[in-house]
Amino acid sequence: MKTNIGSYDIGLRFVGGCIIALWGVSAENLWGLIALPPILTAVCGYCPLYAILHIDTTACDH
């Protein structure tokens, strides 16, 4: 699978996802599960929505 997420995008997704997950844990509710898609796409380096929309942020890494 070709990566379509650049390093800055990966960092923002991962940090944002972790913040949302920590908020969900501290609030003791399931809203923290919203953090799963950003964290998983950051770890994989691939976003299916970007693929559908033909977006590739790897070119922004230069």
Image (cartoon, helix red, strand yellow):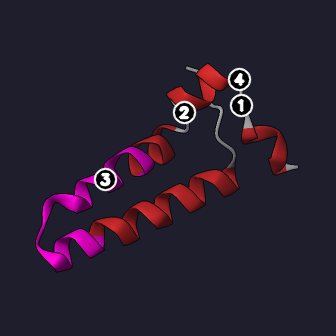
- Is 25 inside the magenta-drawn segment? yes
Comes first in the chain, label 1 or label 3? 3
Distance from the alpha carbon under mark 3 to that under mark 2: 17 Å
Residue at which label 2 appears: 46
Vertical order, 40 against 30 (above or below): above
Residue at which label 3 appears: 34
Identify the element where label 1 is drawn. Answer: loop
From the image, which quarter does the N terminus lie in?
Answer: top right
Identify the element where label 2 is drawn. Answer: loop
Distance from the alpha carbon under mark 1 to that under mark 3: 22 Å
Identify the element where label 3 is drawn. Answer: helix
Vertical order, 24 against 58 (above or below): below
Q: Amino acid at mark 3?
A: Ile
- Residue depicted at 15% across the width and 59% down the height: 30
Q: Main secondary structure of the magenta part?
A: helix
Distance from the alpha carbon under mark 2 to that under mark 4: 12 Å
Distance from the alpha carbon under mark 1 to that under mark 2: 11 Å
Identify the element where label 4 is drawn. Answer: loop
Q: Residues within 10 Å of mark 1 (few under 14, many from 20)?
A: few
Point out the residue furthest to the bottom here: 26
- Residue depicted at 69% across the width and 45% down the height: 6
Q: Amino acid at mark 2?
A: Tyr
Q: Relative to 57, is 46 on the left or the right? A: left
Q: Are marks 4 and 1 in contact (CB under 8 Å)?
A: yes
Q: Which residues are magenta?
A: 22-38
Residue at which label 1 appears: 55
Seen from the viewer's position, the closer of residues 9 and 31 is: 31
Residue 25, picture quadrant: bottom left
Q: Amino acid at mark 1?
A: Ile
Comes first in the chain, label 3 or label 2? 3
The mark lying in front, picked from 3 and 2, is 3
